[in-house]
Amino acid sequence: MANKFTMKLDKSQLEELIQDIKKGITQISTQKDAEKLGKNVVETMKEMIASGVSPIGGRKFQSYKKSYNDAIKKGRYDGLGKYPTPVNLKLTGDFLDNLRFRIVDSGRNKVAEVGFFDKQSQLKEQGHREGANSQKKRPIIPINDEKIARTLKKTLLSHYQELMVEAINRAKAKKR
């Protein structure tokens, strides 16, 4: 005769575990967690932009204007590593070097804000967003209802998945 194995699922145990996880979640947005998230998001955004992909929507940036492309081909930007493709918003590197994160307190949690925090870079991003100096519009900082790219979503989801696993493990360890 085969051994019989039964397991009783107790709703109160599950509810208690959920409460412990909720308590753990309030502890996951520490300075260290926010810094890790900010670093990962900035790295992902810079990689996307360098490959010619917008962090907003995940589409390729529009091509350069013909006159700008011609200037690149004629060597006007030699020594700067500027090529007609990909459209990567890099000329000297200063602009993208200033894409950073900072940690702010939002009550109970620490939050990573990603963007340009110096006036010069903010003006450059605004120029890319609005298409200043007859350039094509190429915004890179999602605002309002703009959708972030799938690649960026994966970075965020991966980060939060790690934090949830940590919260669950803390809750389990507490029960032992």
Image (spheres, rainbow, N blue to C red):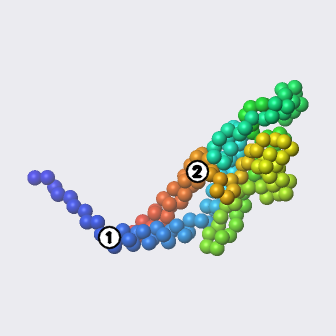
Q: Residues within 10 Å of mark 1 (few under 14, many from 20)?
A: few
Label 2: element kind: helix
Q: CA distance from mark 2 to mark 1?
A: 33 Å
Residue at image x 84%, y 42%? 134
Residue at image x 66%, y 48%? 56
Q: Residues within 10 Å of mark 2 (few under 14, many from 20)?
A: some
Name the amino acid, label 1: Lys
Mark number displayed over residue 156: none
Residue reaching furthest right? Answer: 76
| Left or right position of 23 against 3 | right
Where residue 35 sits in the image (x, y, percent)? 66, 59
| Residue 173 position (above or below residue 124) | below
| Residue 109 position (above or below residue 115) | below
The answer to which image quadrant residue 115 occupies is bottom right
| Left or right position of 80 against 40 | right
Name the amino acid, label 2: Lys
The answer to which image quadrant residue 119 occupies is bottom right
Mark number displayed over residue 153: 2
Residue reaching furthest front? Answer: 134
- Closer to the camera: disc 2 or disc 1? 2
Name the residue nearer the viewer: 5 or 66.
Answer: 66
Where residue 170 sits in the image (x, y, percent)? 47, 66
Say which residue label 1 marks: 11
Where residue 103 sits in the image (x, y, percent)? 70, 63
Tell me if residue 95 can be seen: no
